[in-house]
Image (spheres, rainbow, N blue to C red):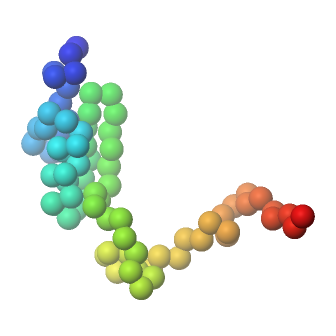
Amino acid sequence: MLERDLMYRIKEKEFRTLTDAMEWAKTTDEFVVILGPSFEACGRFGVDSIKNGLCPDGVVYDWNKANRIGRVSKKVI
């Protein structure tokens, strides 16, 4: 299969490149699934900012890398 034959699909809409599909997905402002030739990508594309401690949809952003499970202890040298 040639690269030009690869297609990416969101619902019934088709795109030649993954970049095109993701750019269109950003305009929908909803959770979408991008179906590719050998994978699926899903999410609400374009959500990439936290302002005043809130995600764009108003959910409080409280993830903290220091509190993750299995964290490595800091050693003072």
Does 66 sit left or right of 33 as displayed? right
| Residue lying furthest front | 77
> Which one is in front, 34 or 53?
53
Which image quarter is the N terminus in? top left
| Residue lying furthest right | 77
| Residue lying furthest top | 1
In the rendered image, residue 31, in percent from the top left (x then y), is placed at 26, 58
> Which one is in front, 13 or 71?
71
In the rendered image, residue 67, in percent from the top left (x then y), is placed at 67, 69
> Which one is in front, 22 or 40?
22
Q: Which residue is drawn at 20% across and 25% down?
A: 6
In the rendered image, residue 63, in percent from the top left (x then y), is placed at 55, 71
> Which one is in front, 17 or 40?
17
Q: Residue at x 9, y 42 (%)?
A: 13
Does 20 sit left or right of 57 as displayed? left
Position of residue 20 relative to residue 44, above or below, is above
Position of residue 21 relative to residue 3, above or below, is below
In the rendered image, residue 55, in percent from the top left (x then y), is placed at 38, 75
| Residue lying furthest left | 13
Q: Which residue is drawn at 11% across and 38% down?
A: 14
Q: Quadrant of residue 3 in the image?
A: top left
Q: Which residue is drawn at 15% across and 52% down?
A: 24
